[in-house]
Amino acid sequence: MEDPVVQVGDPVLRATAADVPLADIPSERVQEIIRHMETVLDAEQDGAALAAPQIGVPLRIFVLSRRVFGPEGPEKLASKDPHFVFINPTITRRSKRLERMDEGCLSVRGRYGTIRRHTRATVHAYNEHGQPFTRGASGLLAQAFQHECDHLDGTLFTDAAEKVWDVETTKHKR
Ligand code: ZN
């Protein structure tokens, strides 16, 4: 069966994704892309987040897993923050501090690595209704922000990882 997530080697993963014109956010086309991303991510047992280029769409959108980041999820973030859809995200602040973190990617199946990430990051974005918001995060969410924004600039974690190894199963792929 064809992989629903675009895999490394496909040029769409190396392109710089385009901003979504704000007037297009309510359009059926953009809403359908968001729904499709959520469906694909939801089907991944270990998926934490997904960027639009990973479904072959070169637009600046990423979505977070409600299973991982929702109120019942291990990260328990959504009780205070309802945002799972990030359109035209920009990282506006990063901690000076970096930390080595283990990381995987749904577009690099079977590989895992160690990468240095900022321990905190703040993202400004628009939600699925076109409303702007700002979200600061630490831990796994801050890591996801950096990983997803990298995707929108055509960067994969393996480009900067200090160490990459083969695995059979991993958790929290993005
Ligand atoms: Zn990824």
Image (cartoon, rainbow, N blue to C red):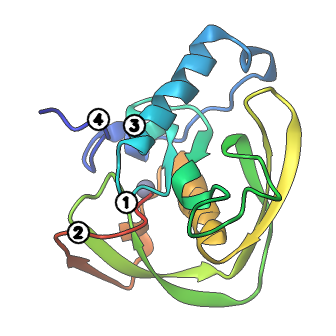
Cβ–Cβ below 8 Å for labels 1 and 2? Answer: yes
User: Quick one: label 1 or label 2, which is nearer the N terminus?
Assistant: 1
Residue at the disc numbered 3: 40
The residues tagged by marks 1 and 3 sit, at their Cα atoms, a distance apart of: 12 Å
Image position of 122 (left or right of 4): right
Task: Inspect the image, locate mark 1, and give the three-letter code of the amino acid beneath it.
Answer: Asp
Seen from the viewer's position, the closer of residues 40 and 108 is 40
Task: Residue 1: name its quadrant.
Answer: top left
Q: Which mark is residue 105?
A: none
In the displayed structure, would residue 138 be above or below residue 157?
Answer: below
Q: Position of residue 153 (x, y in %)?
A: 55, 49
SS class of the residue under badge 2?
loop
Q: Residues within 10 Å of mark 3 (few under 14, many from 20)?
A: some
Image position of 42 (left or right of 109): right
Q: Which mark is nearer the camera, 4 or 2?
A: 2
Image position of 153 (left or right of 80): left
Q: Residue at x 16, y 33 (%)?
A: 2
Residue at the disc numbered 2: 169
Cβ–Cβ below 8 Å for labels 3 and 4? Answer: yes
The residues tagged by marks 1 and 4 sit, at their Cα atoms, a distance apart of: 14 Å
Residue at the disc numbered 4: 4
SS class of the residue under badge 4?
loop
Residue at the disc numbered 1: 46
SS class of the residue under badge 1?
loop
The residues tagged by marks 3 and 4 sit, at their Cα atoms, a distance apart of: 7 Å
Task: Inspect the image, locate mark 2, and give the three-letter code of the amino acid beneath it.
Answer: Thr
Residue 23 visible to the viewer? yes
